[in-house]
Image (tube, rainbow, N blue to C red):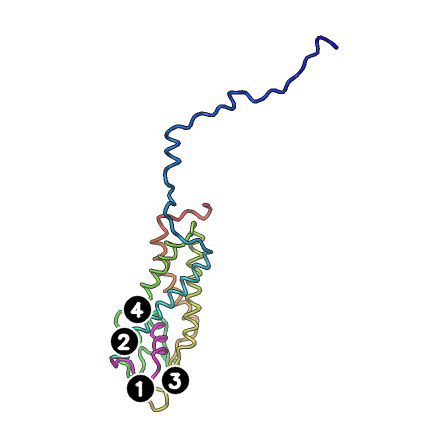
Amino acid sequence: MSQDRRFKYDKGPRLEDDATPPESDDDAAGDERPTSDAGDRRVTVAPWTAGSVAGVSAFAIMFAAFYQLIAAYAATGSYGQGESGPSNWVITGLTTLANHGVTIQQGGEPIDGIGMYPVGLVPSVSALIPAVVLLAAGYVLVRYVALETRREAGLAVGALCASYIVLASGLAVLAQWTPDSGTEGMEEGTIAVAMDLSLIVTVGGTVLTFALIGAGIAALPRLGPAGDE
C-alpha cells in the first residue's frame, strides 16, 4: 500500500455551530407575558350560523316585547272589542311590523289604526323597541362571537338581516284580520300588511341600520383587514 495514501474522514459540525446563545432575561420575560387573547371568551362558530341565531333571537325578543305591550293595553281596555275584534296575536303582528315602518292596509288603503282602537298601531315610543333590540343584537354578535375579519363580521350581520327579514315576511302573511260585516266602527276589507317590495326594503333597512351600528360599536376597535389571519 502506498504511504501517500490518505484517509478522509467526515467532519462533523463545528462546535461553534452547535453553541446557542443563552436566552436573555428580556426574552424569558417576554415569553411569560400574557397574550392579547388571554381571557377571551368569544364563541367560535361559523359566521352565518351566529348571524342566523342572532336574527332569530332578536325577532323573538322583539315580538315578545310587543306582545307584552299589547296584552297590557288589552288589560286596560285600550285594545279590545270582545269576541268580534282581532286577537292579541294578530294585533301584535300588525303592531310589530308597523313599528318597523311597514305600511298596514285595509282594502288596499293605508291605515294608522284598527277601527275604534284609540291607541293606534304605533303607540307611544314603541318604535324604539326594534331599534334597541337590533342594536343589542349587532353588538352581542360581534362582541361575543370570534369574528376575526371584517369579511366574517359582514357575513354574520348579513345572516342576521336575512333571517330577520324571513321571519318578518312570515309574520306579515299570518297577521291578517277581516272584520265581520256590520262590526261597529269598522270598514269593510281585510286588514293586512302591504305585501310588496316595500316590506323587504323597509324591514331590511331598519335591521341593517341598527344592527350595523351595534356591530360597529363592538367591532371597530379590534377587527383587522380581510386578509389577516
Q: Residue furthest right?
A: 1
Q: In front of the other: label 1 or label 4?
A: 1
Numbered tag placed on residue 82 in the rendering: 1
Instruction: Tell me the kind of residue under disc 2.
Output: Ala
Instruction: Tell me the kind of residue under disc 1.
Output: Gly
Considering only order in the chain, which callout, 4 or 1, is on the residue closer to the N terminus? 1
Q: Which residue, given by chain and number where applicable, does mark 4 sit on?
A: 127
Q: CA distance from mark 2 to mark 3?
A: 23 Å
Tag 4 near tag 2, CB within 8 Å: no
Tag 2 near tag 1, CB within 8 Å: no
Considering only order in the chain, which callout, 3 or 2, is on the residue closer to the N terminus? 2
Question: Which type of secondary structure does the marked residue at label 2 adopt?
Answer: helix
Considering only order in the chain, which callout, 1 or 3, is on the residue closer to the N terminus? 1
Q: What's the magenta region? A: 76-97
Question: Which type of secondary structure does the marked residue at label 1 adopt?
Answer: loop
Instruction: Tell me the kind of residue under disc 4.
Output: Ala
Q: Residue at x 38, y 51 (%)?
A: 41
Dot 2 surroundings within 10 Å: few (below 14), some, or many (20 or more)? few
Instruction: Tell me the kind of residue under disc 3.
Output: Thr
Q: Which residue, given by chain and number where applicable, does mark 2 sit on?
A: 72
Displayed quadrant of residue 100: bottom left
Numbered tag placed on residue 178 in the rendering: 3
Q: In front of the other: label 2 or label 3?
A: 2
Q: CA distance from mark 4 to mark 2?
A: 17 Å
Which of 88/158 is in front?
88
